[in-house]
Amino acid sequence: MSGRARLSLCAAAATLMAACALLPLVDPATWIFQAAFLLAVQTGVGALTRRVPLARPLTVAVQALVTLMMLTLAFARQQALAGIVPGPQVFHQFGVLLQEGADDVGRYSIPAPLHDGIRLMLIGGVLVIGLAVDALAVTYRSAAPAGLPLLALYSVAAGLSGGSAAWLWFLLAAAGYLMLLLAEGRDRLSQWGRVFGGAPRTPGPDSAGGAVAPVRTGRRIGAVALGIALVVPLGLPSLDGGLLDGAGTGVGSGSGGGGTISAVNPLVSLRDSLNVDEDRTVMTYRTNADDTQDLYLRIVSLDDFDGTAWKPAQRRIQDVPDTFPTPIGLGSDIQRASIQTRISAADWYAQDWLPMPYPASKVDIKGSWRYEPVGRTLVGDHGQNTRGLQYEVTSLVVQPTAAQLASAPEPSAAMKREFTKVPESLPAVVANTARKVTEGSANHYEQAVKLQDYFAVSGNFRYDTQVQVGSGSAAIARFLKEKEGFCVHFSFAMAAMARTLGIPARVAVGFTPGSPQADGSMSVGLRDAHAWPELYFEGVGWTRFEPTPNRGTVPEYTQTDTPGSNVPAVPKPTLSSSAAPSTAPSASESCTAQQRKLEACPSQSAAATASSHDDSWPWFKILGLTLAGLLVLAVPLLPMLWRMRIRAVRLGGHGRTEADAAAYTLGAWQEVTDTAWDYGIVPDESQTPRKAAARIVRLGDLDPTASDAVHRLAAAVEQVLYAPHPRPVAGLADDARRIADALRTSASRPAHLRALLAPRSAIRVVWAASARRASLTARLAARRETLLRRPSGQNS
């Protein structure tokens, strides 16, 4: 196998090894086999085009075109011409599938089902990365930069999947890249590898020139480089742990008192959880509480609002205390009760923050956990998460009355300074709406209840999980105008509006209480994921409100009218988890593309449903159509490909004998006359080489340098034709290329395109075929005449 072919295989293998990091993202992972097959075809096309050879940009263009045709055949053959030639409808279909894939990414949690949209994103992404790696490492012979697309592929996959097997995907990607570097640099490694291997002690097959064998040296270099990549980060003070350390999960370094929590936004997956098709169980729990409708399982609080997003503030964390201190702001006159809740997390649910009722006063849990006192949350340290954990939480059920909340004094200056801060970029409509909604309120409690009522009842807001979360300073203003969204929008807007009124506010993220089970336990699913605002009242502490319509429960302390106030009683919605989602859309809903993909349209027949799944072709048909499409595209390019191949043969290497020198010289001369013919200078076989050279110089309007090259080549031809012992002449190939460049420069653009795509000298193929046909016809005729004459000779 040649070095270029070996490098092509290594490039494809490195891409496929890096793509393995995508395997945990979807289920099943059978897409990797289709990606491997299409990647092999892409690599084969590259090897063939480089063997012709084609110009480097043209090689990449042919590979890209074949890649597009393969994706067309696999994903949009019904919209393509002859099932493989892409057109406008094909690109429209790609856009539809990519949009469906993006919707699925936001709809499902990991691992997502392997729908066509996600499959196109995965396979298309791998092929694009494979094309980039092949172009850099093989076509342009620069393997080192090829690590950038490989790194991009691995980084995206590792950033989405995570998990305990992340080290395996890193090792696979690193091994593929090192293999690619070794294949590309075998000769260079043999020259500088002695730095790592040392000089051989005794002569042997590996000691030629004092260099170590390239393969052995490459292994040593790879091991050293990989070890440095893993070990060096451990010693850098600016990094929290090494590559395989769990510190990258959002918790600061160290295992004792200290460290900080980084600003990890847990809302990234909240919308995904609410939109899953299958409501997977996240956790189950048992509690001795008399009523579970207010038992929200809180994960983390978002108290840093920068106008673009809410996120956890960076705070100091410490060891988990045996008993948590009394919640900040909770007075002794507020009614409370202590309850115990035993929680079991699902084996697949890996959350860095610990879900538990608020406010917790004690947690009995195993593992490496840290305590953040301001938010009263527990967060995993060095890779610790909730996967399969069982733990017990002792928490308080705080039951303030409306009168106590209404008579709460102003919060402290420090509390207001930290938790009523809003950025200057917040649109004025947010504060204006807050003042308008709460007009006439006597205190912060009445303002809070009116805000809750505005969103949940009187404001005509609509709950819709398909609305994007949104970002930027105008996101809340847009929500207030369009009046549709889900819990993120409602909680964000109410907390921001409360802050503009001087009420300390933050957003909590977690789960609603869940659904009761027959055995007395409670089951919490992905669709129970929720966000709600917490407002601070001095003497009560952080208090939950529920502005999201038809989600969770409205707190009891917002239901009774306060004497002297006009706050209405807010109707209490039922638990969201108790209402099972309908399997069919309502009559008022239109049948969207997403519903058609999910087979949720009422008018869809069973036959149509069955046919929608029968959409896979056997691989031999796909391969056959791919080859047919390549043949259709290759036919118009055959003259150009033939000329490129002939030029490479004529101007390539040659032997050292007189016969080899003569053949090489005559081949170079014929290449010059054919190139001149391609640019319109028809060869004249009756002229001597010297006169033919003068004619090419005159008609081609060649510059002095190219003119000298033509005459040198003509002189070399005359020596071959007339000298008794022809001698090899150096530089003939360079002269021939110099002449071709001069002809190309002096020709017009149409003439250049004609010479490239439809060279006149390609007629020699027809002449050669005609001559062979005539020769074969003559031989067959002679053979037939011999057979016919043989019997007459025997009878004589």
Image (cartoon, rainbow, N blue to C red):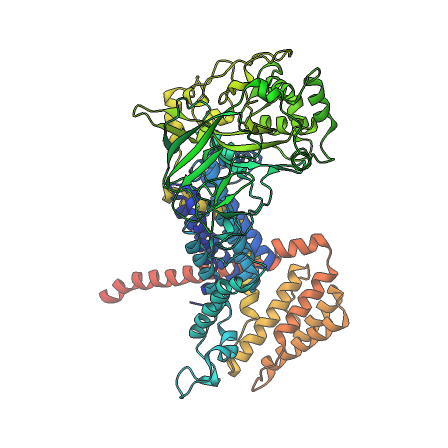
Q: Is residue 759 left or right of residue 250?
A: right
Screen quadrant of the N terminus: bottom left
Q: How many marks?
A: 0
Q: Is residue 63 above or below residue 545?
A: below
Q: Position of residue 48 (x, y in %)?
A: 49, 58
Q: Would residue 12 appear left or right of 303 to someone viewing this image?
A: left
Give residue 747's position: percent from left, percent from top. 73, 59
Q: Position of residue 197 (x, y in %)?
A: 46, 79
- Residue with the most extreme left position: 795
Q: Nearer the viewer, residue 348 or 554?
A: 554
Q: Is residue 741 left or right of residue 369?
A: right
Q: Nearer the viewer, residue 500 or 332?
A: 332
Residue at the far bottom in the pictured view: 202
Nearest the viewer among 77 and 317 is 317
Q: Considering only vertical position in the picture, is 336 above or below 59?
A: above
The quarter of the image holding the C terminus is: bottom left
Q: Is residue 719 visible?
A: yes
Across and down, in percent, residue 522 comes to 37, 27
Q: Quadrant of residue 411?
A: top right
Residue at (58% x, 76% y) in the render: 665
Q: Which residue lies at the image location 53% right of the left edge and 25% below the top edge?
A: 333
Is residue 638 visible to us here? no
